[in-house]
Amino acid sequence: MYSLAKLAAGDYEVTVAAEGLAVKTENVKAAEGASLTFSAELTALPSAPEAQTQAPAINAPNAPPSNKAPSLEDLGFPAAEIKSNPKEQALLDKRTHMLKIHQRLGLITTIPMIASVATSINAGGRHTSNTDRTVHMVLGSATGDLYFMTAWYAIRAPRVEGTKSRGPIRFHKAMAWIHGPGMILTPILGALAYSQKNNGEKVHGIAKAHGPVAIVTAGAFGAALLSVSLLKVSTSGKFMNANRMTKQSASVFLLLLLTLPQCLLAADEQWVLDQSTLSYHVSHPLHQTEGVSHAARGKGLCHEGQCDFLIAVPVKSFDSGDSNRDLHMIQVTRGAEFPMVTVRTRLPESDSKSATINADLEIQFAGQTAHYKQVPFELTTQDKEAKITGTIPATLSDFKIEPPTLLTLPVKNEMPIRVEMNWHRQ
């Protein structure tokens, strides 16, 4: 018995089908807004001779995953975490666009700012001309106009709900509380000093603070600029055994993903990922960037001498130590639209006896699929435990990701992924 409510007026053709039963079709008419209830009884199809069973093909080692391979649902991620969110992706795209303009305008602002500081010597001395003061004033005005345009794009850039500031971006924002008021006070004090000098007076009163305020303002602005380009950031994580300093470049990404498990197997059994450390490395002319995730989940199913592995990690789980750059990474890699990075591979059981395994990997990331042939990994086993370590030679172009830029300079295409995973056999 089937019931359909609030149908538009018209003639309908209803077809009911089920495996092994004959298809039944009925024509019905419905009035506007009426409900339609109908029943259908299906009859069994005549029995047909069984198709000849074919012997299963023997899959070669590292062949594509079979229909017995684990699925993303098997890994237990919450539905909200693996669901595409185009609306959030559009928000990230807008945010990145506005912050790129903010960054470029900030660089342009440094030009008249430096020039105005340099000309201040001639503008404020005892024997200065009206021309010197006018040039200084024009440069200062240009600096102020560009500064407030720069600030507007930063203030109006969309905020991502639930994101807390971490890393160099905190210092960058803190400096705004110094150079922001300074950029308001400096031209006011400068106008007072300019008027006093033109009247033949010696600069006096509060106008004398024009120079010191301008210097402090320029210094805070420069420090804010350098904080997002040269300042090192240390992120804690098992992958950084040597306390490596990480620095996040504005972009970077992605990449991350890659988690590769491979191996270790036993006939007709299951492997589960216990712990993992996945880290990506991106190089920029001004600094190096690393992001790390410990949120990967993985499972391996073994059958007839072959083991199919699936590893998945949320793009948002990678942490570079700077919240601003992590958001940029998510935007560049389309992490809201394609929230998961998945890695699949197939390995023969015999690999569990080797110290080194070579795996063919299929990685889905940023809406693209890339294949890596014979990637070497080191394997250490003890009882039912196995540890796999290695590096995936990924590049941004493998996933059609446009290299992000910082201060107009792009990052390098190479983006190696370091993998450390601990598995146990159930």
Image: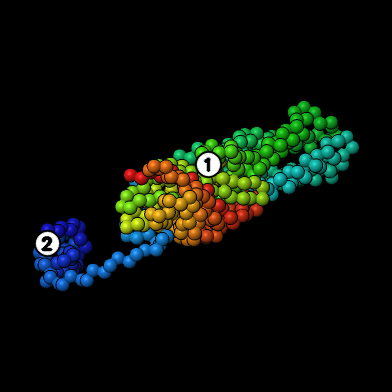
Q: Position of residue 181 (x, y in %)?
A: 65, 34
Please state which amino acid type lies under the numbered disc 1: Phe
Q: Residue at x 74, y 46 (%)?
A: 112
Q: Residue furthest right?
A: 127
Q: Which of marks 1 and 2 precedes in the sequence?
A: 2
Please state which amino acid type lies under the numbered disc 2: Phe
Q: Count of labels shown?
A: 2
Residue in front for this viewpoint, 219 or 304 = 304
Residue in front for this viewpoint, 388 or 356 = 356
> Which residue is denoted by mark 2 in the rendering?
38
> Which residue is denoted by mark 1 in the rendering?
239
Q: Residue at x 71, y 45 (%)?
A: 110
Residue in front for this viewpoint, 203 or 354 = 354
Residue in front for this viewpoint, 252 or 147 = 252
Would you say the residues marked 2 and 1 are in contact, meaning their CB atoms lie under 8 Å apart?
no
How many angstroms separate mark 2 from mark 1 (CA)? 62 Å
Rendered image quadrant of residue 23: bottom left
Q: Nearer the viewer, mark 2 or mark 1?
A: 1
Specify few, some or many for label 2: CA neighbours under 10 Å numbering under 14, 14-19, or 20 or more: few
